[in-house]
């Protein structure tokens, strides 16, 4: 009676390891690409939330301290790709000019996630100010019917982007 040997040959083992290695590399690449897309989406969504936050502050006629007695002021968001390529500001419009100026108080500076860029801002630089009580919406100091557009993209990949639009009617929307 012959004994039957069970197990793998060295050639079978090498083929199986090759298949496992190839699948691992492919899945790792897909995971990294998806993580970058999620980071882009989260950055755009955070910006959208911040714009809505300052809009709500104006609608609720929230008070702010601009050096004098606390009073009801306008609130806004400011982007400048040249001076602040990886951040944007939320601010109180202390001087009432309906755009970001040196006299205004910064509520906070928001850093954009690493690996995500501001691809473009139109108009640039951009101040969007919400003025109580309605709130009225001003883009770079003007209430005329206009629209601002901010595009976030992945660093080194301008095909993956999120487009945010804000108009003077106060509508804020995000698309791909």
Image (spheres, helix red, strand yellow):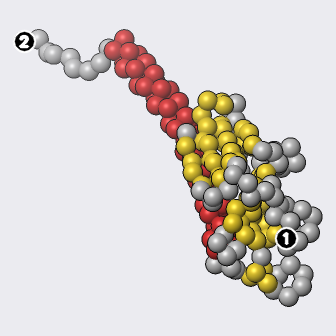
Quick one: label 1, few (<14), some, or many (20+) residues within 10 Å? some
Residue 5's disc is: none
Helix, strand, or loop for circle 1?
Answer: loop
- Can the viewer see residue 105 in this picture? no
Q: Residue furthest front?
A: 144
Determine whether, in the image, residue 11 is placed left or right of residue 158.
left
Residue 3 occupies quadrant: top left
Residue 1's disc is: 2
At which x and y percent is residue 11? 37, 11
Residue 96's disc is: 1
Q: Residue furthest left?
A: 1
Comparing marks 1 and 2, which lies closer to the viewer? Answer: 1
Determine whether, in the image, residue 27 is placed left or right of residue 110.
left
At which x and y percent is residue 138? 74, 60
C-alpha separation, residue under disc 1 versus residue under disc 2: 100 Å
Q: Quadrant of the C terminus?
A: top right
Q: Residue at x 40, y 20 (%)?
A: 19
Is residue 46 or residue 71 the one in the foreground? 71
Q: Residue at x 55, y 34 (%)?
A: 33
Answer above or below: position of 12 versus 108: above
Residue 82 occupies quadrant: top right
Answer above or below: position of 170 versus 9: below
Q: Residue at x 11, y 11 (%)?
A: 2
Q: Residue at x 63, y 60 (%)?
A: 170
Is residue 144 or residue 28 the one in the foreground? 144
At which x and y percent is residue 151? 67, 41
């Amino acid at each position: 009676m012959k004994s039957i040997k069970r197990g793998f040959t060295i050639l079978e083992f090498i083929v199986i390891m090759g298949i496992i290695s190839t699948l691992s590399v492919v899945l790792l690449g897909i995971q990294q690409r998806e993580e970058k897309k999620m980071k882009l989406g989260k950055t755009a969504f955070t910006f959208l939330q911040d714009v809505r936050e300052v809009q709500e502050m104006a609608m609720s006629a929230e008070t702010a301290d601009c050096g004098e007695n606390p009073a009801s002021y306008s609130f806004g968001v400011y982007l400048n790709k040249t001076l602040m390529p990886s951040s944007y500001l939320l601010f109180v419009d202390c001087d009432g000019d309906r755009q970001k100026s040196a006299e205004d108080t910064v509520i906070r500076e928001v850093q954009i996630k690493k690996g995500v860029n501001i691809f473009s801002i139109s108009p640039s630089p951009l101040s969007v100010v919400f003025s109580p009580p309605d709130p009225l919406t001003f883009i770079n100091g003007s209430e005329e019917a206009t629209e601002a557009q901010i595009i976030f993209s992945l660093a080194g990949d301008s095909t993956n982007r999120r487009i945010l639009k804000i108009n003077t009617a106060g509508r804020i929307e995000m698309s791909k």
